[in-house]
């Protein structure tokens, strides 16, 4: 039998070898920057499989997973019903590039669940959804400018990469090269949760704005819930200036209850983008909203959008199965209980916990953390230490201090307790 020391060095060796090979053929060794562990250091773990609340790396080490594919898996990894639905669909053919019945079923399910969505177009990624939403808003209003919030992230389409969140917060790229200035000239930026900054932009540019896009709960600079009245003010000011309000619910859609966060805050956007959960872990996303705006899309209208894999048969099968399972209210009750337990257990004078349902962030910051500046004032070193100590204990956190932690209904109270105990022990060292 191998000693635990030998096992560990062998384990690290396997990931190291894979990472070395990867870097020769994949830029940075990864297909999405945050995965490279750039902001916390060390070698990324290569994940071989997942089941329920856990993932296993290539070496066989098991971890309690708090990434859960960045929020795509509220039921945990490889839920048997979802797997069965996807397997069955795959056996019938993986893609046709033609209309299928399940696209209609998923569209009906989404429009029934989210009242502001009268019509919906299925696409393959959140980036495609937000890109299409902005194109629609511009065509509808015949205006060009868009407003986003500092630290909010809406995928990697050109107009959004200005003061964006997610990997751009920790990789030192305030914005990206390769984007002509003329493209981002029409992107205005306001401070999230700051009504004054919003009003300033509207005072000077209200008549030129096509849309405002916002994550109703910011989830890509860590979790930052909206201040009371912020989203309501946003709705009011958009209506006053005939500006399209887009809620980017790629993370929040079906995360807190069966529907959008918009139902919980009682604000009705004109357009909504969805992703992650609605695809049950497969590449599927959507843009939906008022029919008069959606009907501008080709083939009905003049706004072009298309995709070979849009409404993919396997992804729609996994999405429908997931949404059916999420209609059980007990799941959201469990997610809330687990989230509250974890947040309570992590409470500590050196850490500000922002939580909403099963999504949370631990900022090393005295708090409160309600704005981008306050997020950025967090200490990154203790998070790095926590990340690596947790990894050694078999707990997989997001490899960045500015990403959300996600809990699934497959997590157990025991795993939450194990995480809290780990936190208390490592944070005191
Ligand atoms: N942009 C994602 C986090 N907010 C990371 C995507 C990934 O690496 O899978």
Image: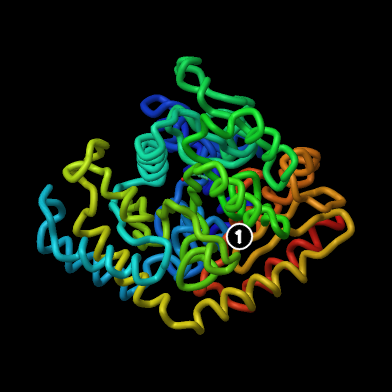
Rendered position, 136 above or below 215 = above
Give me the residue at 61% from left, 75% from top.
Answer: 336
For the image shown, how many numbered marks are present on the structure? Answer: 1
Residue 410 x, y percent position in the rendering: 50, 74
Q: Is residue 13 visible?
A: no
Residue 153 x, y percent position in the rendering: 54, 41
Q: Residues within 10 Å of mark 1 (few under 14, many from 20)?
A: many
Please say which color scheme the image uses: rainbow
Tell me: 215 left or right of 417.
Answer: left
Give me the residue at 11% from left, 57% from top.
Answer: 93
Rendered position, 149 above or below 348 = above
Residue 373 x, y percent position in the rendering: 77, 38
Q: Secondary structure at mark 1?
A: loop
Tell me: 48 left or right of 397.
Answer: left
Rendered position, 341 above or below 13 = below
User: Which residue is labeled 1 in the image?
Assistant: 394
Q: Is residue 415 visible?
A: yes
Give me the residue at 66% from left, 44% from top.
Answer: 402
Tell me: 242 left or right of 132.
Answer: right
Q: Along the line of sight, which residue is nearer the eye, 16 or 277?
A: 277
Q: Along the line of sight, which residue is nearer the eye, 3 or 75?
A: 75
Residue 398 x, y percent position in the rendering: 59, 50
């Amino acid at each position: 039998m191998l000693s635990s020391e030998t096992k560990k060095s062998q384990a690290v060796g396997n990931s190291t070898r894979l990472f070395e090979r990867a870097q020769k053929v994949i830029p940075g060794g990864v297909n999405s920057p945050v995965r490279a562990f750039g902001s916390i250091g060390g070698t990324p773990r290569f994940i071989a499989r997942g089941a329920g609340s856990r993932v296993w790396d290539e070496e066989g080490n098991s971890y309690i997973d708090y990434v859960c594919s960045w929020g795509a898996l509220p039921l945990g990894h490889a839920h048997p019903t979802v797997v069965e639905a996807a397997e069955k669909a795959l056996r019938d053919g993986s893609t046709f590039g033609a209309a299928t019945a399940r696209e209609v079923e998923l569209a009906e399910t989404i429009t029934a669940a989210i009242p502001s969505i009268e019509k919906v177009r299925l696409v393959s990624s959140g980036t495609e959804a937000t890109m299409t939403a902005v194109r629609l808003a511009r065509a509808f209003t015949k205006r060009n400018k868009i407003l986003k919030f500092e630290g909010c992230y809406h995928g990697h389409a050109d107009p959004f990469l200005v003061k964006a969140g997610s990997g751009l917060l920790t990789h030192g790229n305030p914005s990206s090269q390769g984007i002509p200035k003329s493209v981002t000239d029409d992107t205005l930026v306001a401070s999230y949760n700051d009504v004054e900054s919003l009003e300033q932009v509207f005072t000077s540019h209200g008549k030129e704005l096509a849309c405002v896009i916002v994550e109703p709960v910011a989830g890509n600079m860590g979790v930052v819930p909206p201040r009371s009245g912020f989203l309501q003010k946003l709705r009011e000011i958009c209506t006053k200036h005939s500006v399209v309000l887009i809620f980017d619910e790629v993370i929040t859609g079906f995360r807190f209850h069966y529907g959008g966060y918009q139902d919980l805050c009682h604000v009705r956007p004109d357009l909504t983008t969805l992703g992650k959960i609605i695809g049950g872990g497969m590449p599927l996303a959507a843009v939906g909203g008022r029919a008069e705006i959606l009907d501008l899309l080709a083939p009905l209208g003049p706004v072009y959008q298309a995709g070979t894999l849009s409404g993919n048969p396997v992804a729609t099968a996994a999405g429908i199965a997931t949404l059916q399972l999420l209609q059980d209210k007990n799941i959201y009750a469990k997610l809330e209980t687990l989230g509250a337990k974890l947040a309570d257990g992590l409470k500590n004078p050196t850490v500000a916990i922002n939580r909403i349902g099963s999504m949370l962030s631990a900022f090393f910051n005295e708090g409160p953390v309600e704005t981008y500046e306050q997020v950025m004032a967090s200490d990154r070193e203790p998070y790095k230490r926590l990340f690596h100590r947790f990894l050694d204990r078999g707990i997989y956190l997001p490899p960045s201090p500015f990403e959300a932690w996600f809990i699934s209904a497959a997590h157990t109270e025991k795993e939450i307790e194990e995480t809290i105990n780990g936190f208390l022990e490592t944070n005191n060292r």
